[in-house]
């Protein structure tokens, strides 16, 4: 992936910014085989964000991260969404992550893979990690888990 149409100084600024945000500045010149799986995942996210896309497609973007780094990256992605207004389409199997980061959640059936249910998330862009303890968050989590469980039982 290459950033085109920008001056070298702007490219260097973006690279430095995203390396810093991802906590990777001291590994900026490391070869990929010297990075952990989680670090490589953060590099991939940083590379995607550095192009400042209007649409960001993510498939289990935080799956390889430890819980602390995962939480930091979720907060960071929420901030990116708030600042840029980019459309983010994310596939995740983590129900709580889906609720925390989404405006809409699509629960898919397993066979065939179709939209089983669309759920609107009742939290605004200014959400904080503390919403995870609210009754409405927990109710939505339970509703989604029941949908997923019914899918397993039907399958």
Image (cartoon, helix red, strand yellow):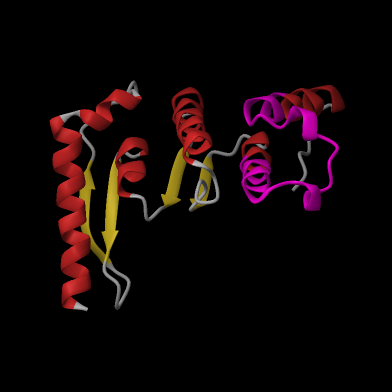
Query: In the image, is residue 21 above or below residue 62?
Result: above
Task: Give the residues drawn in magenta, as a range.
Answer: 17-45
Q: The C terminus is located in which quarter? A: bottom left
Give the prevailing secondary structure in the magenta stretch: helix
Q: Closer to the camera, 148 or 34?
A: 34
Q: Residue at x 70, y 24 (%)?
A: 17
The foreground one among 82 and 128 is 128
Residue 141 in magenta stretch: no
In the image, residue 91 sits, relative to residue 42, either above or below, namely below
Q: 54 left or right of 46?
A: left
Residue positioned 37% across, 55% down in the render: 93
Rendered location of residue 28, percent (x, y): 80, 34
Identify the image quadrant of residue 148. bottom left
Going by the image, does 44 lie left or right of 141?
right
Name the residue located 17 percent from the left edge and 74 percent from the top edge.
153
Whether residue 27 appears in magenta in the rendering, the answer is yes
Residue 152 position within the rendered picture, expressed as x and y whole percent measured from the top left: 22, 71
* Residue at 48% in and 53% down: 60
Give percent across and percent down for residue 116: 21, 63
Percent x, y of residue 133? 22, 29
Residue 131, image quadrant: top left
Q: Determine if residue 6 is in view.
A: no
Note whether residue 90 is visible. Answer: yes
Q: For this view, does 109 lie left or right of residue 2?
A: left
Numbered circles on residues, count: 0
14 relative position to 75: left or right: right
């Amino acid at each position: 992936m290459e950033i085109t149409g920008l001056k070298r100084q702007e490219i260097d600024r973006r690279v430095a910014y995203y390396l810093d945000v991802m906590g990777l500045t001291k590994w900026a010149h490391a070869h990929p085989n010297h990075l952990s799986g989680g670090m490589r995942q953060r590099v991939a996210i940083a590379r995607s964000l550095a192009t400042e896309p209007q649409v960001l497609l993510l498939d289990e973007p935080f799956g390889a991260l430890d819980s602390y780094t995962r939480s930091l990256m979720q907060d960071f992605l929420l901030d990116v969404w708030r600042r840029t207004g980019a459309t983010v389409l994310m596939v995740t199997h983590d129900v709580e992550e889906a609720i925390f980061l989404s405006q809409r959640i699509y629960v898919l059936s397993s066979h065939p893979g179709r939209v089983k249910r669309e759920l609107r998330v009742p939290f605004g862009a200014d959400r904080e990690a503390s919403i995870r303890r609210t009754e409405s968050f927990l109710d939505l989590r339970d509703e989604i888990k029941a949908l997923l469980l019914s899918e397993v039982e039907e399958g």
